[in-house]
Amino acid sequence: MSVGRNTTIRDRHRKQIARSKPPCGICGNEIDYGITDHLDPMAYVVDHIIPLNAGGSDTVDNKQAAHRSCNRTKSDHLPDQHTPAGRVFETTRRWW
Ligand SMILES: [Zn+2]
């Protein structure tokens, strides 16, 4: 079985994660799961805790809920800055 991007599984994971309405795994704030505009920066997206291109798996335990804007911010980071267990993020990030 390859680690492909199966949209059926991905959609199922997405619904599975949304069911418990968890807060954003990146910023920790609540997510409005009622947002239907997927381009809204506060919309719910599925984030890979370990990015696929860093060897992360496309399984639900490697996924978390996140805001769209947070997910995009995170993608600027290098994978080794993320510690899935500790969820410690640097606060010294510069915003330019
Ligand atoms: Zn967030």
Image: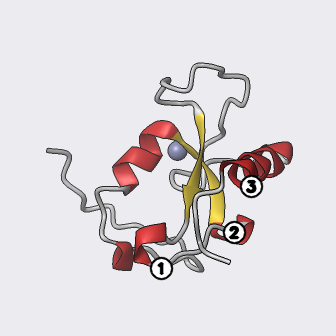
Q: Which mark is first along the chain, 2 or 3?
A: 3
Judged left or right of residue 84, residue 60 is right
Q: In this rendering, does residue 46 appear at all?
A: yes
Residue 9 - label: 3
Judged left or right of residue 49, residue 77 is left
Residue 27 horizontal/vertical position (percent): 51, 51
Vertical arrangement, residue 59 with respect to residue 7, above or below: below
Q: Which mark is first along the chain, 1 or 3?
A: 3
Rendered image quadrant of residue 35: top right
Say whether marks 1 and 2 touch (CB < 8 Å).
no
Judged left or right of residue 79, residue 61 is right
Nearest to viewer (mark 3 / mark 1): 3
What residue is rendered at 61% in x and 75% in y? Answer: 2
What residue is rendered at 49% in x and 38% in y? Answer: 68
Vertical arrangement, residue 38 with respect to residue 24, above or below: above
For marks 3 and 1, give the CA distance: 18 Å
Residue located beneath label 2 in the image: 59
Q: Quadrant of the C terminus?
A: top left
Say whether marks 3 and 1 touch (CB < 8 Å).
no
Residue 62 horizontal/vertical position (percent): 64, 70
For marks 1 and 2, give the CA distance: 12 Å
Three-letter amino acid code of the residue under disc 2: Thr
Nearest to viewer (mark 3 / mark 2): 3
Q: In which quarter of the image is the N terminus?
A: bottom right
Determine if the C-beta at disc 3 is less than 8 A from ligand 1: no
For marks 3 and 2, give the CA distance: 9 Å
Rendered image quadrant of residue 29: top right
Three-letter amino acid code of the residue under disc 3: Ile
Residue located beneath label 1 in the image: 55
Residue 15 horizontal/vertical position (percent): 79, 44
- Assess disc 1: are there few (<14), some (14-19) or many (≥20) residues with their C-alpha within 10 Å of its C-alpha: few
